């Protein structure tokens, strides 16, 4: 599910539709999107993007115009396997639609995919660092990857380049040998990045590339 940044809508993904709840009219609307697994609004709340799950191929993406309900389905993306897990099909950890609905970013293991909705083309940007989780801020300015060896890799979407790399705190031996499976997400304004593994987490300044906070355990 996802709330629109303007506070008007809640989008809930079910098996064959996106249910759009309008808090102004109190009326729900169903927009068809088969086998969807991800849903996210654009920063201006005008668009909604979803990813559709396909068992033996990389999923397609569907862009909805929230005002008109018009939908645009992407072509079939290029075939992408997860390098660290051969045979597993790549899918997005998080999506973002930007530039007035002209582009979509899908961030996941190994890199991010750019869909040009007008040209109906894809660009695959591999990070080359074998990450196991990824996030993209709502305005699609940055993509962040967690590298299991204990680093965060920050990329600039516009230039398709890594701009910073941060070292995560050293793991306690009881927590395992790597950060594989760690969670990562941006705050709504994109200024802060949150990393979380087991019961511990960190807060990072995106602009400064520094850790500014942390928490330990489930009660903090």
Image (tube, rainbow, N blue to C red):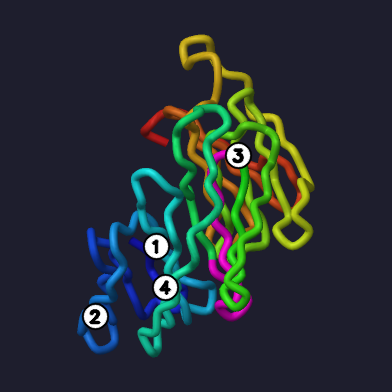
Rounded to the nearest angstrom, the CA distance separating label 4 from label 1 is 11 Å
Q: Secondary structure at mark 4?
A: loop
Q: Quadrant of residue 121?
A: bottom right
Q: Residues within 10 Å of mark 4 (few under 14, many from 20)?
A: some
Q: Are marks 3 and 4 in contact (CB under 8 Å)?
A: no
Question: How many other residues sit within 10 Å of disc 1, few (<14), some (14-19) or many (≥20)?
Answer: many
Disc 4 to disc 2, C-alpha distance: 15 Å
Segment tinted magenta in the rendering: 97-110
Give the CA distance from mark 1 to mark 2: 15 Å
The residues bearing labels 2 and 3 have C-alpha atoms spaced at a distance of 35 Å
The vertical placement of 40 against 56, above or below, is: below
| Residue holding disc 1 | 39
Q: Nearer the viewer, residue 192 or 112?
A: 112
Q: Are marks 1 and 2 in contact (CB under 8 Å)?
A: no
- Residue behind mark 2: 29
The residue shown at (46%, 31%) is 87
Query: Between disc 1 and disc 2, whose residue precedes?
Result: 2
- C-alpha distance separating marks 1 and 3: 21 Å
Observer-side mark, 3 or 4, equals 3
Q: Which residue is mark 4?
A: 4
């Amino acid at each position: 599910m996802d709330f629109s940044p303007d506070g008007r809508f809640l989008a809930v993904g079910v098996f064959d539709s996106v249910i759009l709840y309008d808090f102004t009219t109190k009326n729900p609307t169903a927009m068809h999107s088969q086998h969807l697994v991800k849903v996210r609004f654009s920063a201006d709340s005008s668009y909604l993007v979803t990813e559709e799950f396909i068992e033996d191929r990389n999923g397609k993406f569907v862009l909805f115009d929230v005002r008109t309900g018009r939908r645009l389905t992407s072509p079939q993306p290029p075939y992408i396997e997860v390098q660290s897990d051969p045979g597993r099909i790549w899918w997005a950890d998080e999506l973002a639609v930007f530039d007035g609905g002209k582009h979509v970013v899908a961030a996941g293991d190994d890199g991010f995919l750019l869909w040009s909705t007008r040209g109906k083309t894809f660009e695959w940007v591999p990070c080359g660092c074998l990450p196991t989780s990824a996030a993209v801020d709502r305005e699609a300015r940055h993509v962040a990857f967690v590298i299991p060896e204990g680093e965060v890799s920050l990329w600039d979407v516009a230039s398709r380049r890594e701009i910073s790399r941060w070292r995560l705190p050293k793991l306690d031996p009881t927590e395992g040998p790597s950060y594989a499976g760690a969670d990562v997400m941006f705050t709504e304004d994109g200024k802060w990045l949150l990393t979380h593994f087991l019961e511990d987490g960190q807060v990072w300044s995106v602009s400064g590339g520094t850790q500014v906070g942390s928490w330990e355990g489930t009660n903090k």
